[in-house]
Image (cartoon, helix red, strand yellow):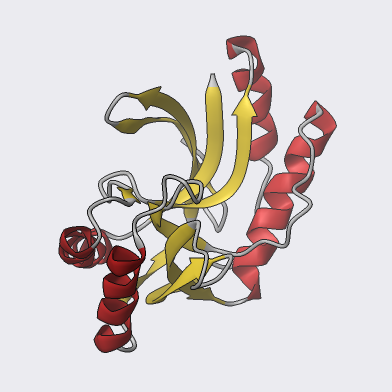
Amino acid sequence: MRVFVALDIPEPVRAAIGALVDGLRAVCPDARWAGTRGAHVTLKFIGEVPPEAIESIQTSLSRVHIPDFIELKFRGLGFFPNERRPRVLWAGIEAGADLGGLAAAVETALEPLGISKEQRIFSPHLTLARFETARQRPGASALDRLRETISRAGAVEFGSGAASQFHLYQSALKRGGSEYTRLATFRFAGGESQ
């Protein structure tokens, strides 16, 4: 099973991002656009695990708690690693240090199970599109149109929300993209896990 830990995003934010993606897809159709229906804030990508490991993962995640809920603001667009040679188009997420603290707590909870800690700095974002290798990357004119459209859009605001729970998801790679199934929900700020 391929699994990950994530926060859900509010429906109004999902709708706003979906509307933007629909417009950008028309400008740069060759990019591999992510579906917004399953958009989430990844806290930890675990990867492939045997089905019998899920119970231990759930037990470890049920111990993760931080004092307060987390305020999230979804705004801005950018490229990884850079605008000139993009691999990913992302929507930004602004949150206090508590979001990074939650991600670190998830990492710490899973480490005794042999799940390695992420070496990269936690950088919360929503992936909107992927650009494959240079050979498969959209032509310069399509990327130029995409960059110009994003530049004209200015400071894009998608909305905000508060989170008090996170989820363990299974990801199944399908022909039309990834399909996500929620396996468990964990309340990290007050209350009990489900």
Q: How many marks?
A: 0
Looking at the picture, does residue 52 appear above or below residue 9? above
The location of residue 88, given as percent across then percent down, is 47, 58
Q: Quadrant of residue 73?
A: bottom left
Residue at 43% x, 59% y is 126
Q: Is residue 76 left or right of residue 110?
A: left
Q: Is residue 99 left or right of residue 113?
A: left
Looking at the picture, does residue 194 appear above or below residue 107? above
Residue at 79% x, 37% y is 116
Q: Quadrant of residue 144?
A: bottom left
Q: Quadrant of residue 99?
A: bottom right
Q: Is residue 58 visible?
A: no
The location of residue 47, given as percent across then percent down, is 61, 30
Looking at the picture, does residue 14 appear above or below residue 155? above
The location of residue 162, given as percent across then percent down, is 41, 67
Q: Is residue 178 visible?
A: yes
- Viewer-side residue, 47 vs 109: 47
Q: Is residue 123 left or right of residue 76?
A: right
Residue at 59% x, 77% y is 96
The location of residue 103, given as percent across then percent down, is 65, 55
Residue at 41% x, 24% y is 172
- Viewer-side residue, 82 vs 124: 82
- Position of the N terminus by quadrant: top right
